[in-house]
Amino acid sequence: MADRVVTAGGIDKASVSFEEWNDWRWQFRNRVRSLDVLARLSNPPSETLADWQEVLRHYPVAITPYYLSLFNPDDGDDPLRMQCFPDSREIHFSLGGVDDPLCEERDMPVPGLIHRYPDRCLAIVTNTCAVYCRHCNRKRLWDKEKSATRQRLQAMIDYVGRTPNLREVIVSGGDPLMMPEATLDWFLGSLKAIPHLEVLRIGSRVPATLPMRITKGLCAMLRKRRPLWLNTQFNHSREVTPESAKACEMLLEAGIPVSNQSVLLKGVNDDYASMRELLYALERISVRPYYLFQCDPVRGTDHFRTDVWRGMEMMEKLWRNVSGLCLPRYVIDSPGGRGKIPLQPFSFLPEKG
Ligand SMILES: *Cc1c(COP(=O)(O)O)cnc(C)c1O
Ligand code: SF4
């Protein structure tokens, strides 16, 4: 545990107990959400502060004391800080991103359920997250924190039930592990009861931002719903801590394979050395790198976007140098909602003969 603890109440030297720190509810309650604490932490110049005020009007901030303890808030270039601190560039739409470039809202047969690929669909069950990632491609959804009502979830269950092509549901958000546990249990159980539904998947960033959320009780509940896969999002090797390693270990022991989907982020992981460190760190904790996403042209994320060719060059070098188990698929989710496109490094077959 860090010597200096920063919570919603401000900066505190020592008064947090070990039990509190390791209690996800305590972490959640004490997320830093106000400009006041952020300003005291990093002393931004007054123009920046005014910009931040404007940013917060569009996009809220939440940072768990745990995630805050992993970096130095004074260092504006810290790759972990960049992912969660407000940035004036979020409100300067220089390149004109849009709120929903993937047209997710268009492919919703019922509210909150995106059915784009024939055999699987994606359910947005809450808009709440432990930490709001500044690069999030669903930042359009971050208004008041709320989870889908049972009525809405029931409509999703009914749709899956009457759509026999669907064999997999991806439970996403927001962060589904932030919704009430009993509701999640009921939702997963109801889906599992549909005869043609074979596999469940959860997308959650808590192993990186609130690893204490992976409790024994949660693992016991998820265990009942196997085959269930969990996809998480580590973007930097420094997010792979003993706490997050333990969270992933508990999931793996419960029979839930953990994979990782990173987002390629300028200044965070868009260079060979940083990405290799991240991939090696994931392999060490038995988490399989699955996708590396090109950052979507979402409004308020321009400053994170790296050139595709830079990404390709990095991937090519990785292909040549690192273990195959570490290699994610580099994909771009095509604007206009036409789905994911893999970006493969060029390969040359030897001459036939
Ligand atoms: C990415 C995505 C999926 C899952 O795709 P996989 O390639 O199976 O990981 C499903 N539905 C939507 C709408 C998606 O964006
Ligand atoms: S955890 Fe996922 S949904 Fe939540 S803010 Fe981060 S990227 Fe967006």
Image (cartoon, rainbow, N blue to C red):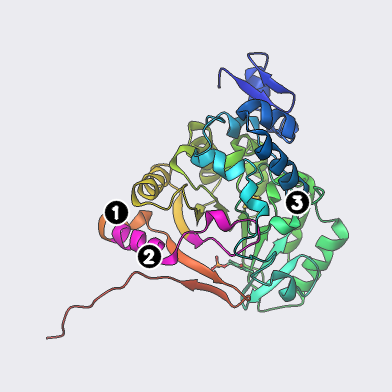
Work out how far the residue at label 1 is from the one at label 3, CA to CA, in angstroms: 41 Å
Q: Quadrant of residue 74?
A: top right
Residue drawn where x is 50% and y is 61% of the image = 293
Question: Which sits in the foreground, 196 or 184?
Answer: 184
Is 260 above or below relative to 39? below
Q: Please tell me which of labels 2 and 3 falls first in the chain.
A: 3
Tell me residue 138's x, y (percent).
68, 58
Asked whether 296 falls inside the magenta stretch, the response is yes
Left or right? Give the position of 196 relative to 303. Answer: right
Query: Does the beta carbon of the residue at mark 1 sit less than 8 Å from ligand 1?
Result: no
- In the image, residue 218 lies at what x, y percent? 67, 42
Where does label 2 land, which residue? 312
User: Which mark is on residue 30?
Assistant: none
Mark drawn on residue 322: 1
Disc 3 residue: CB within 8 Å of ligand 2: no
Give the foreground label among 1 and 3. Answer: 3
**Magenta region:** 292-319
Task: For the N terminus, give its image quadrant.
Answer: top right
Q: Sequence-wise, which precedes: disc 1 or disc 2? A: 2
Residue placed under numbered mark 3 in the picture: 58
**Which residue is rendered at x = 69% and y = 70% of the image?**
104
Corner quadrant of residue 22: top right
**Is 259 one of the magenta-colored residues?**
no
- Residue 338: x %, y % from top left: 59, 78
Answer yes or no: do the residues labelled 2 and 3 have beta carbons within 8 Å?
no
The residue carrying pointer 2 sits among few (fewer than 14), some (14 to 19) or many (20 or more) residues within 10 Å by Cα, namely: some
Quarter of the picture containing the C terminus is bottom left
* Depth check, front residue: 96 or 129: 96
Q: What amino acid type should be assigned to the residue bearing mark 2? A: Met
Amino acid under disc 3: His
Element under disc 1: loop
